[in-house]
Image: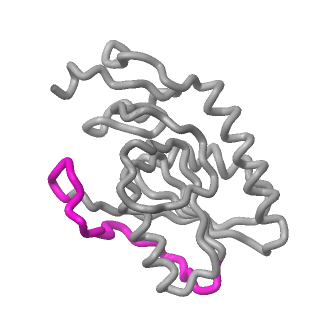
Amino acid sequence: MTNDVASILLTEAEIKEKIKSLGEIITNDYKDVNSILIIGVLKGSFVFMADLIRQIKIPCEIDFMSVSSYKDSTSSSGEVKIQKDITINVAKKNILFVEDIIDTGFTMSKIKEMFFERGANSIKLCALLNKPDRRNTSVTIDYKGFDIPDEFVIGYGLDYADRYRNLPYIGILNPKVYE
């Protein structure tokens, strides 16, 4: 499996340090609210979210959703499809979405719009990785881990063909794997 990694972009130690810092900032920003609803966007966010919530020192509710805008293609269809919705009523809740990576920003901008329509009090976004070179819509990342180049990355929850999620670091996938 590691033969498929062209190079390590972010080490396990770098990721842990960043998550600790993000948890402290989020805790401080939400210290005056009763609770926050943290929603992980599956599948890629689950490893990051598990580590992040252990660093947040205020009451929180947890839920997950799965969305797609790609159908069976490698490019966005322009329509966000909810494959698994959350089970908690979001009316008057302070929501923190947790994403593994933001590239075009399209899906998250549509999700945020949807949740404001459902009555959310506030919505913020925490993303471990940001690919600013791929952005084609405006989306604010309130809590950002790392800006990364436009490379195909794997590990720490991110996959290619449902593999490599269990790597403890983030690596660049060797192009020979997908070409």
Give coordinates of residue 119: x percent, y percent: 55, 86
Q: Position of residue 114 (x, y in %)?
A: 43, 78
**Quarter of the image where the C terminus is located:** top left
Quadrant placement of the N terminus: top left
Which percent across, then down, holds residue 27?
Answer: 78, 57
Q: Is residue 114 magenta?
A: no
Q: Residue at x 34, y 32 (%)?
A: 152
Image coordinates of residue 36 in percent, x first then y, are: 68, 69
Instruction: Locate residue 35 relative to residue 128 in the image: left or right.
Output: right
Task: Compare residues 132 and 179 and report the one nearer the observer.
Answer: 132
Q: Nearer the viewer, residue 131 or 27?
A: 131
Rendered residue at 43%/66% (across/down): 109
Judged left or right of residue 12, residue 84 is: left
Q: Which of the 4 quarters of the picture holds residue 81?
A: bottom left
- Left or right, 29 with respect to 133, comes to right
Write the start and end of the magenta stretch as one range: 71-93
Q: Is residue 73 magenta?
A: yes
Residue located 73% across and 40% down the image: 20
The vertical placement of 18 against 84, above or below, is above
**Residue closer to the observer: 88 or 137:** 137
Residue in view at x 74 percent, y 71 percent: 35
